[in-house]
Image: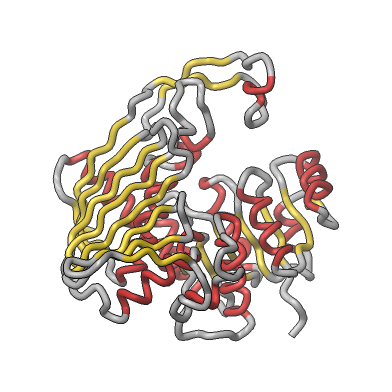
Amino acid sequence: MPPLTAAVVGTGFIGPVHVEALQRLRRPVAGILASSPAKGRQAAADLGLPRAYESYEELLADPSVNVVHLASPNRLHFEQCKLALAAGKHVVCEKPLAMNSRETAELVRIAQATRVVSAVCYNVRFYPICLEARQRIAEGLLGDIYHVTGSYVQDWLLHETDFNWRVLADEGGALRAVADIGTHWLDLVTWIVGREISAVCADLKTFLPVRQRPKGSVETFQSKLGKPPATEPITIDTEDYGSVLFRLQGGGNGCCTVSQVSAGRKNSLRFEIAGSKGSLAWNSERPNELWVGYRDRPNELLVRDPALLRAPANRYAGTPGGHNEGFVDTFKQLFRSIYEYIEGGDRESRPFASFTDGHREVLLCEAILKSQQSGQWATI
């Protein structure tokens, strides 16, 4: 089988992360597609890629490309996924898979009717400590799951002058903090405990109903380097904050808080899982540590070390103990899992999220929005 070759769509924050992770895996990347030819050429030069595609049609027509990585804005995912699947390409799509469950259901149907592999980039699963937590629960070390609590908080939208396409409902969807970062938390904890969410009760809040949008094209962080750009006020109806109570299928309860206006928190995902025999806790800002809690003996702190981790967590720990791994390493291990799966690897223990998982997350978001609007619990 010839080596799998990728092409990446998107040159913002995440697109280059995809490219660099693939390069670290020594997976060929044929080229990149940006929102304009000029941006594409610059990105290709910066990332050492041989080609900048002029259009998505040109990318899909490239016979050397087997896998399409979509790191484009949310509103483009549905059509781009459909076209890639129709072209017989394997698809790795950033979340959310699409803008609504009608679109995601259609993508699941199309993907299941093809022979290609489709995946959604829930990369947080691939912190080795998260894989270890999942395995410990699967082995029954926590006993019955009582409840799951935690949060995902950031501060990058704290000021009214902070603006990004994600704050606009027609660009990113009706939910923002929940859909953008909350789905990472929800996917992670349900995957770790091995149970889906059956019902939700949500409380969402927009603290900054008006933001200042830059006039014209402004590069990220430009206002920090010189004169602030001219702006115009724009009404915002996507949430800055949300808390969601939930019930798990098969028993167990939980609560998650998300915020993009928590000063000082750059990217903090935390969870604590309480069971009848013990507890587990993890914080993405200390990603190489797993806290293990007991009632009747001293608590433990497991520091990431392949020699001390269970399978399959030890397979996805890329450096020896004491040599820390972080955010970019999760993409490397996620793509390693996907590409090995495409090549006929272990089909019984697929750890990456499928289009079906992506569809489920969109259904969950729609239930959260329904609960917020009705003021009542909503079932999934």
Extreme residue in the front direction = 298
Q: Quadrant of residue 209?
A: top left
**Measuring 33% from the left and 59% from the top, which residue is drawn there?**
281
Q: Measuring 61% from the left and 69% from the top, which residue is drawn there? A: 319
Quarter of the image for the C terminus: give it. bottom left
Question: For this view, does 149 lie left or right of residue 35?
Answer: left
Position of 342 relative to 325 (above/below): below
From the top left corner, tell me how far across and down residue 14 is, in percent: 61, 49
* Foreground pick, 8 / 149: 149
Give left or right: position of 73 versus 272. Answer: right
Q: Is residue 336 above or below residue 95?
A: below
Which image quarter: residue 207?
Answer: top left
Whether residue 10 appears in this view of the structure is yes
State the residue at coordinates (32%, 78%): 138
Image quadrant where one finds the N terminus: bottom right
Protein image colouring: secondary structure
Q: Residue 217's x, y, as percent?
A: 67, 26
Query: Measured from the top left, where is residue 377 in percent x and y?
Result: 15, 50
Total numbered labels placed on residues in the image: 0
312 and 56: which is toward the camera = 312
Q: Is residue 113 visible?
A: no
Q: Position of residue 24 (x, y in %)?
A: 71, 64
Q: Residue at x 55, y 55 (%)?
A: 327
